[in-house]
Image: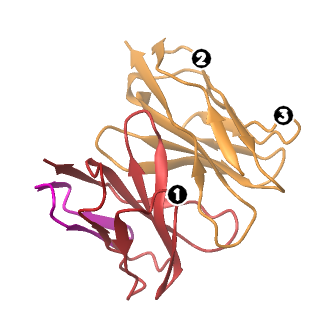
Amino acid sequence: GDSVTQMEGPVTLSEEAFLTINCTYTATGYPSLFWYVQYPGEGLQLLLKATKADDKGSNKGFEATYRKETTSFHLEKGSVQVSDSAVYFCALSPNQAGTALIFGKGTTLSVSS
Amino acid sequence: DGGITQSPKYLFRKEGQNVTLSCEQNLNHDAMYWYRQDPGQGLRLIYYSQIVNDFQKGDIAEGYSVSREKKESFPLTVTSAQKNPTAFYLCASRETGGGSPLHFGNGTRLTVT
């Protein structure tokens, strides 16, 4: 079945460092792909999305490109801030009506000043 | 503002008692979902509903029940049959079109002792 694999954390960075969180997926057809962020004690917030190959989603300095050839959707940010410390989830929506999103296990990011 | 409201934020119950978690949305979304989140395990799908008066089991439905009598509401009951009910529960909704993102509530943390 469809699945999402993302790099295990925690990821620990200094402020202004470059961030990459890897995400790869297995799916039939052409799923939509998402990154969500979760701050402590809260629900998940949509960070960015891409719905077809070569699409680039971007928001708040974060970017991810839908790579069909490598089945990947890696999250990047050029310069992280302390406020970016959170858990990041990669997810896919299968290209079938009536199905739920499938999530990776999450990657914890900790940024220190 | 449109959104998803989960209540209460914290819930405590004794073992052997059933408990119902509330989820209300005013986004006019047809589809609603319940996920369970445990440390290190990401999000696991409990139940979902694509339309009023219809719902489907997710990956971990045993020990849970739901109803969908109104479009806006999708309550989850954690029964005494659920072996490990202590967890963080997240409700979400989305439009039924392909590629639509999930919108999440802020979650309910259930502790059963």
Question: Residue at position x 28%, y 52% from top?
Answer: B85
Q: Position of residue A82 (x, y in %)?
A: 39, 22
**In the image, which residues are magenta?**
B1-23
Marks 3 and 2, the one that precedes in the sequence: 2
Q: Amino acid at mark 1?
A: Asp
1 or 2: mark nearer the eye? 1
Residue identified by numbered label 2: A18
**Amino acid type at image mark 2:** Phe
Q: Label 3: few (<14), some or many (≥20) within 10 Å?
A: few
In the rendered structure, the colour chosen for chain A is: orange
Q: Is residue A100 left or right of residue A24?
A: left
* Position of A11 relative to B29 (above/below): above
Judge whether A14 appears above or below B67 on screen. Answer: above
User: Subunit of mark 3?
Assistant: A
Lateral position of residue A48 relative to residue A26, left or right: left
The residue that mark 1 highlights is B59
Residue A98: image x %, image y %?
64, 72
A6 or A52: which is nearer to us?
A: A6
Alpha carbon distance from label 1 to label 2 = 36 Å
Residue behind mark 3: A70
